[in-house]
């Protein structure tokens, strides 16, 4: 009986390890996707499917977050007139006039108790990176265009989107299908690495 219990426990442990140990293919695919990510600023007029939108948002919401507060909020914009008008509000996001979709990553700037949340920018930046990597994995093009901490830009976009007072826009991400001409940049610089101390 003890031997049977031991074998069952060993089988369960083996199965758990198989489910949690990444395979070489998984590691290669993840690293390849990270290194393939690029800032795409030109898009076709092909729409982005609702399935792809939800996939990107699920990836964004899987990001790390201080005390699991999850302050991120997202505004999905896919109406042509609204995208064009938003391009007028954001001087560094003129590609919105071509993109079929934008996702504005916003953060709730207050904690549970109403005090200031000092980590919302970090949490929302992590969510943004996840969203960009998901777009890359889906074969889409995307680019991070900054809003916060430019307070005038943030205020104008907040007014445009009708954001509540405790929600701040961090960035706007134009997203769409691209023609494949934009290539990733090699940013590897060993001289920027220090071990132990500077």
Image (cartoon, grey):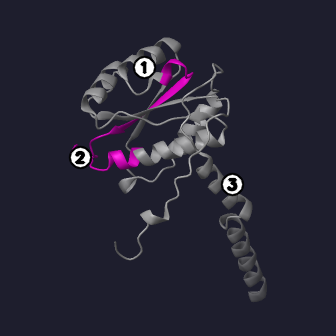
Residue 194 point in image, percent of width and height: 41, 70
Q: What element carries label 1?
A: helix
The residue wearing badge 1 is: 87
- Decide: few, some or many residues near mark 1? Use Cα within 10 Å; few <14, some 14-19, many ≥20: some
Q: In this view, does 15 lie to the left or right of 187?
A: right
Asked if the residue at tag 1 contacts the one at tag 2, i.e. Cβ–Cβ closer than 8 Å, the answer is no
Q: Is residue 17 above or below residue 163?
A: below
Residue 71 circle label? none
Between marks 2 and 1, how big is the CA–CA gap?
Answer: 36 Å
Q: Which callout, 3 or 1, points at the residue further toward the start of the chain?
A: 3
Give residue 51's position: percent from left, percent from top: 64, 32
Q: In which quarter of the image is residue 67?
A: bottom left
Residue located 54% across and 24% down the image: 101
Question: Which residue bears the numbered disc 2?
Answer: 113
Q: Is residue 122 magenta?
A: yes
- Residue drawn at point x = 39 percent, y = 48 percent: 123
Q: Which residue is drawn at 67% across and 34% down?
A: 180
Residue 12 part of the magenta segment:
no
* Tag 3 and tag 2, C-beta contact below 8 Å: no
User: Alpha carbon of mark 3 to alpha carbon of mark 1: how far?
Assistant: 34 Å
Of residues 49 and 110, the one nearer the viewer is 49
Query: Disc 2 on helix, strand or loop?
Result: loop
At horizontal 37% and vertical 24% (from top left) the residue drawn is 91
Residue 74 to residue 31: above or below: above
Specify the quadrant of the image occupied by residue 158: top left
Earlier-in-chain disc, 3 versus 2? 3
Image marks 3 and 1: residues in contact by CB distance under 8 Å: no
Circle 3 residue: 29
| Numbered range of the magenta stretch | 95-124
Q: Quadrant of the N terminus?
A: bottom right
């Amino acid at each position: 009986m003890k031997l049977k219990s031991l074998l069952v426990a060993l089988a369960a442990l083996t199965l758990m390890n198989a489910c949690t140990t990444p395979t070489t293919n998984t590691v290669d695919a993840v690293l390849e996707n990270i290194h393939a990510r690029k800032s795409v600023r030109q898009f076709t007029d092909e729409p982005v499917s609702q399935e792809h939108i939800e996939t990107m948002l699920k990836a964004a919401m899987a990001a790390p977050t201080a005390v699991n507060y999850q302050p991120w909020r997202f505004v999905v914009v896919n109406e042509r007139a609204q995208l064009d008008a938003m391009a007028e509000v954001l001087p560094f996001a003129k590609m919105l006039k071509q993109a079929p979709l934008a996702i504005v990553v916003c953060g709730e700037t207050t904690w549970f108790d109403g005090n200031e949340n000092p980590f919302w920018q970090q949490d929302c930046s992590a969510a943004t990176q996840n969203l960009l990597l998901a777009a890359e994995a889906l074969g889409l093009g995307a680019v991070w265009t900054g809003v916060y901490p430019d307070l005038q830009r943030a205020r104008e976009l907040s007014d445009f989107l009708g954001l509540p007072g405790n929600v701040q826009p961090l960035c706007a991400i134009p997203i769409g299908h691209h023609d494949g001409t934009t290539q990733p940049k090699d940013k590897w610089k060993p001289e920027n690495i220090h071990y132990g101390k500077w």
